[in-house]
Image (cartoon, grey):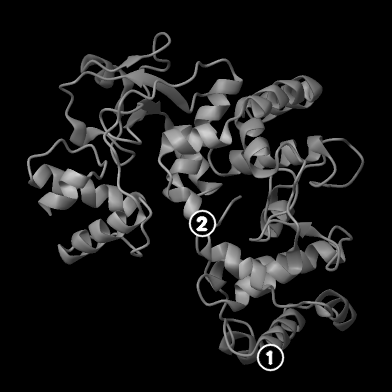
Amino acid sequence: MRILAPLLLSLTLGSTAVAQQCGGDFSSFVQGLRAEAAERGHSQDNIDAFFRHASYSQRAIDADRRQGIFTVPFTDFARRLISQNRMDNGRRNAERQNATFDAIEQRFGVSRGILLSFWAFETDYGAFQGDYNTLDALVTLAHDCRRPHIFRPQVFAALEMFEAGDFDPVNTLGAWAGEIGMVQMLPEDIIAHGVDGDGDGHVYLQTSAPDALMSGANLLSSLGWRPNEPWLVEVTVPSDLDWYQSGIHTTRSVSDWMADGVQGRSGALPMQNAQASLILPQGRNGPAFMAYPNFSVLFEWNQSFTYVLTAAYFATRLEGAPVFDARSPEPGLDGNAMRQLQQALAQRGHNVGEIDGILGAGTRAAVREEQRRLGMPADAWPTRALLNAL
């Protein structure tokens, strides 16, 4: 699932469209979308056919507010998502789509492991692609004032797909946030990066694995994927490392990390002249990974650190890496304690974003700073000891 970075809405459209960006009466909001579509040059017949059955989806709103799974620590999250069945199906699909993956690696340099991983996590290799009406989800989330800048443009992209015969406003189903197909792409991304992988003249991400995989690879390539480079390697770390340097905020050459005692767990670290980050998802006593530049590209697909790390790790497993060493991390904080910590950090002037109990990038950065101020190991892992100290 890719949630796009904020997009600036055009102010060159008519006053009716600009005045009604979100909220208010839903029927009036849809009328505003219709008016904007007309100003964009779409025919009235197409506008009528496209918006005729658009309805408010409370299910989409509920799903948008219900993302508590991302409060689970990495080790538990990874064990929950990476089953033996997903491993076995991944290997079978790798064999079944071998020719497609060969073409992808030659054309885009995107590893099959990465695509298999997102294919697995997004839709269980296409088995369940979502049961939300895509148009209803997009219009509802555009109407909702939490992130209209993300979803409003997707409504008009779906209208373009409808006019091309590639979107059915009544029968197209997908994820709660409007993504479509086996690797869950938003309409704007399908228009910009869809690839006809099977040569039938159409891009069908719901029924054609070659189309979905080639399109996903093209999207990653457009986001800056570096061809034929690694993304994540498990490492071992010495006990006396400067923990403040860990985290995605810091990059150093792999050779410098090695000079400080960081080593590959299963062999020599690749690309020793490359810049990389040391990732400690559960602090200095938990699992450890070296994250290369391609790892950062994956945040354009999904912005959850835990989800991205798990997908990146699963991709390495599908390509032969061993099960990670969980080690013995200190217990983390539950949701209520995490909210207390975020409130304490915010009171000390740190920007942790929403007080939501989720260990996001802002909270990790604040934890790291407070740990260093208090003379604690600054590994960005929030513990009860830190909360008590604050």
Note whether 90 is above or below 179 in the view shown: above
Q: Is residue 262 left or right of residue 95?
A: left
- Amino acid type indicated by mark 1: Ser
Query: Which x, y percent locates residue 301?
Result: 56, 47
- Amino acid type indicated by mark 2: Gln
- Residue beneath disc 2: 67
Q: Is residue 356 left or right of residue 166?
A: left
- Nearest the viewer among 91 and 269 is 91
Note whether 165 is above or below 124 in the view shown: below
Query: Which x, y percent locates residue 350?
Result: 21, 60
Choose top left, top right, bottom left or bottom right for residue 178: bottom right
Q: Which of disc 1 and disc 2 is earlier in sequence?
A: 1
- Nearest the viewer among 173 and 71 is 71
- Residue drawn at x 61%, y 91% is 15
Query: Which x, y percent locates residue 94?
Result: 73, 23
Which label sits on residue 78?
none
- Nearest the viewer among 41 and 159 is 159
Q: Is residue 283 left or right of residue 386?
A: right
- CA–CA distance between discs 2 and 1? 29 Å
Note whether 120 is above or below 349 in the view shown: above
- Residue drawn at x 48%, y 39% is 77
Which label sits on residue 28?
1
- Residue drawn at x 50%, y 50% is 69
**Quick one: label 2, few (<14), some, or many (20+) residues within 10 Å?**
few
Choose top left, top right, bottom left or bottom right for residue 143: bottom right
- Nearest the viewer among 372 and 203 is 372
Q: Is residue 304 visible?
A: yes
